[in-house]
């Protein structure tokens, strides 16, 4: 009898060890000596299981997360989208690796459970998790190779992956990616928004840019339906990682800041961006109901100048005159109620790699601006069309811009557009001057310069083609020596500021108001994307 009990105990202990091994993550190699375990800590020391295990049956006191959206969904193909729907497809699709809940300097496993990099950093081998697409079909290395190769040729993504040659499936769960040259911090770029994996079969069935693709991701949420005024996601209960806490997410279209604030006040939404200092102060005063999350965002409030759309803007002295026309100190107070990080002179924010104070600065000087216009042959001014989105912040900025520009003798014609239409116009170059919010990439300045200033950059709103900029932007993306790369950034910044390709005004700060019960959030400072599967409700 004792012998039989001993055997049973051994079997029971063995079973417990097996179950424990299946339930826990394994530490595997990743770049920089980081553990590639998928677990992480959320804000306030909470577990990353803002979700729940599949066996939990406890009633959810707040099953639906409701968030405002600036416009109705326009594009859910992540390799075609223009940016207005990032947050939605960030919940639908996965990357091979992911940021550590907003920390853009640490990569953790996602669809790739581990990876190896060759000594010359030209060959990357990814070992994939076993999971399914939202339609039940298996996720395979063929899908990954297809997604990476697709990014190298599509217009919206090709300039972001210039270092990639191609990828190929080695077996069902192993993919190898080949680089043309070694690229600084590539693993962090792989965690960023363009690197979403799509189902090869879905793209081949529906075609590029078809929103039907959005119904077939691998992410923690599945697309349920798109309708006018609202897009609904449901939790993916077959998710390969921790399940999300919220059973549904509703993205409700709201363009007016006061409408959003009223909706938060009434419990119709759970979070919103706060766009005025007055509203920020109000949220601070209501600490028993709300929490104000203040994010120093990596970006600047800018005016972009399309040289191809107005002949006057092709003249350097005219662009310089427009820079001297703006009073950044006043804009910070009058437009943003002081909720900025102060006047800006470059696209990179203080503290980022590549930021420098040594470039050309343009202090407010309307007299100097008029002198430059006269020198350029525009003493009597010219007409400039100013495009802006019909959001509160953009409207306030546009009104201030009109006043500053007309004060130096340039007539301004205002061109208001709905937010998604304004974004589309920026990509298409269908504007002369436009208010834009430029986001830099803290871990990846080479990509910033490539996106915005390279002749074929996908965010080259200025439509510039400058051989010197192209040369330095390419060099920055290939230089692995930190000191040499910083020198390239400095040279680039000096030249771009002297050319006045754009008008930076203030460094960005973002205020987000939450219902006090919402926990687990962490935001990427440049894209303002967050891992919604880490959010949860705490009574």
Image (cartoon, rainbow, N blue to C red):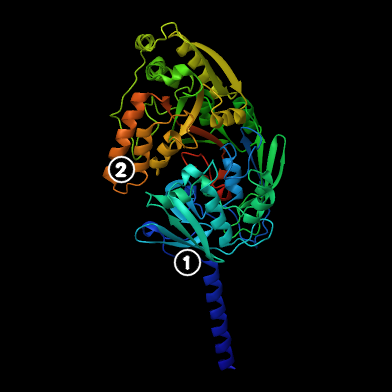
Q: Circle 1: is it few (<14), some (14-19), or many (20+) Cα within 10 Å?
A: some
Q: Are marks 1 and 2 in contact (CB under 8 Å)?
A: no
Q: Nearer the viewer, residue 539 or 259?
A: 259
The percent position of residue 399, horizontal first and vertical second, equals 52, 15
Residue shown at 55%/70% (left/top)?
22
Q: Earlier in the sequence, mark 1 or mark 2?
A: 1
Query: Where residue 191 appears, x then y in whole percent?
Result: 48, 50
Residue 26 shows which numbered tag?
A: 1
**Relative to 339, is 88 on the left or the right?**
right
**Res 288 seen here:** no
- In the rendered image of this protein, does residue 209 appear above or below residue 494? below
Image quadrant in which you'd find residue 9: bottom right
Query: Does residue 218 sit above or below 436 in this rendering?
Result: below
Question: Looking at the image, which residue is at 55% across and 88% down?
Answer: 6
Residue pushed farthest top?
380
Q: Where does the image place residue 170, in percent across and percent down from the top left? A: 51, 66
| Quadrant hosting residue 8 | bottom right
Position of residue 366 relative to residue 529, above or below, is: above
Q: Position of residue 358 (x, y in %)?
A: 28, 29
Secondary structure state at the residue bearing disc 1: loop
Q: Circle 2: is it few (<14), some (14-19), or many (20+) Cα within 10 Å?
A: many
Quarter-of-image position of residue 16: bottom right
Residue that numbered label 2 is attached to = 485
How many numbered discs, if any?
Answer: 2
Which mark lies nearer to you, 1 or 2? 2
Is any atom of residue 138 visible in this view?
yes
């Amino acid at each position: 009898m004792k012998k039989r009990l001993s055997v049973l105990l051994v079997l029971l202990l063995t079973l417990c060890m097996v179950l424990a091994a299946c339930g826990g993550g394994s530490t595997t190699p990743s770049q920089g000596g980081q553990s590639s375990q998928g677990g992480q800590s959320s804000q306030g020391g909470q577990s990353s299981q803002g979700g729940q295990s599949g066996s939990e049956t406890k009633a959810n006191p707040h099953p639906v997360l409701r968030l405002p959206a600036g416009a109705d969904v326009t594009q859910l193909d992540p390799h075609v989208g223009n940016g207005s729907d990032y947050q939605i497809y960030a919940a639908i699709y996965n990357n091979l690796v992911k940021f550590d809940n907003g920390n853009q300097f640490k990569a953790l496993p996602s669809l790739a459970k581990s990876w190896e990099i060759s000594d010359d950093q030209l060959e990357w081998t990814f070992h994939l998790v076993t999971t399914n697409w939202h339609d039940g079909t298996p996720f395979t290395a063929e899908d990954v190779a297809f997604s990476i190769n697709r990014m190298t040729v599509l217009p919206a993504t090709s300039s972001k992956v210039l270092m990639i040659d191609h990828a190929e499936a080695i077996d069902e769960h192993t993919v190898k990616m080949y680089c043309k040259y070694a690229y600084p911090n590539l693993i962090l770029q792989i965690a960023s928004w363009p690197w979403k994996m799509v189902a090869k079969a879905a793209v081949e069935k529906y075609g590029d840019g078809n929103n039907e693709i959005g119904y077939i991701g691998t992410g923690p949420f599945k697309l349920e339906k798109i309708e006018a005024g609202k897009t609904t996601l449901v939790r993916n209960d077959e998710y390969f990682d921790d399940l999300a806490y919220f059973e549904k997410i509703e993205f409700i279209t709201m363009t007016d800041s006061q409408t959003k604030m009223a909706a938060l006040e009434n419990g119709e939404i759970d979070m919103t961006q706060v766009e005025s200092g007055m509203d920020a102060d109000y949220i601070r005063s209501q600490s028993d109901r709300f929490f104000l999350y203040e994010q120093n965002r990596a970006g600047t409030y800018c005016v972009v100048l399309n040289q191809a759309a107005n002949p006057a803007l092709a003249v350097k002295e005219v662009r310089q005159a427009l820079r001297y026309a703006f009073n950044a100190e006043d804009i910070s107070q009058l437009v943003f109620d002081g909720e900025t990080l102060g006047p800006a002179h470059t696209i990179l924010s203080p503290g980022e790699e590549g930021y420098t104070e040594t470039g050309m600065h343009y202090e407010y000087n309307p007299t100097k601006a008029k002198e430059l216009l006269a020198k350029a042959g525009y003493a009597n001014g010219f007409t400039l069309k100013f495009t802006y989105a019909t959001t509160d912040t953009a409207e306030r900025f546009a009104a201030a811009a009109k006043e500053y520009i007309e004060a130096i003798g340039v007539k301004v014609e205002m061109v208001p557009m709905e937010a998604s239409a304004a974004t589309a116009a920026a990509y298409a170059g269908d504007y002369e001057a436009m208010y834009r919010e430029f986001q830099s990439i803290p871990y990846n300045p080479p990509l910033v310069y490539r996106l915005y200033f390279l002749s074929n950059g996908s965010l080259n709103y200025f439509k510039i083609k400058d051989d010197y900029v192209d040369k330095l932007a390419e060099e920055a993306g290939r230089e692995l020596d930190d000191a040499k790369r910083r020198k390239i950034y400095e040279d680039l910044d000096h030249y771009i500021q002297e050319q006045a390709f754009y008008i930076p005004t203030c460094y960005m700060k973002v205020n987000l108001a939450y219902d006090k019960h919402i926990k687990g959030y962490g935001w990427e400072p440049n894209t303002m994307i967050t891992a919604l599967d880490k959010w949860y409700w705490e009574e």
